[in-house]
Image (spheres, helix red, strand yellow):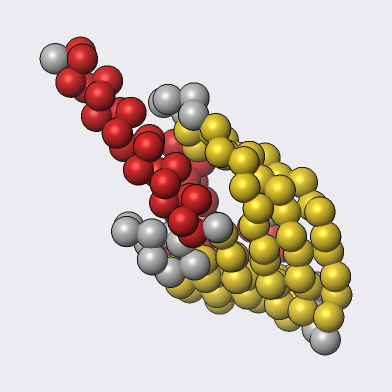
Amino acid sequence: MLAKYVEDIIYTTNAGGPNGESLTIRGKQRVRDRYLSTMEVIESRSRIEYLRWDSGLVRTRLFVNIRQKDTGVDLTTTLRQIIRFRGFLIAEIQDFHDAAKLAAFWRFIGATLDKRKTESA
């Protein structure tokens, strides 16, 4: 997938920081590192609901299923994206998650993992 990105890709998400805040990552290697670290803890599947080319931008809406590997807890949510191209390569991606729902999911995962640690001690 990263072969379709420019080297100086800009990736922004509204809910990807350590405390659920917005996050911007610049550069293909940093985006790769982010994707790889994310794939260590979750499995994700998405289905395109909507895709539109609009004034040089691609706008999408996806249905997304996220499964946290250690707990097996699933989240089904939506994701909107705005994607800008340079030639035939992706130059910028903006992800817009349901930030409150995603934050609640990660809080639940944290509480579940904490409970398992307490029970096993």
Residue under the point 77% across and 79% down: 57
Q: Residue furthest bottom?
A: 55
Query: Residue 34: percent from the left, percent from the top?
Result: 46, 55
Residue 106 appears in view: yes
Say above or below: 27 vs 79. Answer: below
Query: Residue 49: percent from the left, percent from the top?
Result: 81, 54
Q: Nearer the viewer, residue 90 or 76?
A: 76
6 vs 23, left or right, is right
Query: Residue 59: percent from the left, percent from the top?
Result: 76, 70
Q: Quadrant of residue 53?
A: bottom right
Residue under the point 52% across and 70% down: 12
103 vs 82, left or right, is left
Quarter in which the C terminus is drawn = top left
Q: Nearer the viewer, residue 99 or 51?
A: 99
Residue under the point 63% across and 75% down: 92
Residue 27 appears in view: no
Q: Quadrant of residue 81?
A: bottom right
Residue under the point 71% across and 77% down: 84
Query: Residue 2: percent from the left, percent from the top?
Result: 64, 58
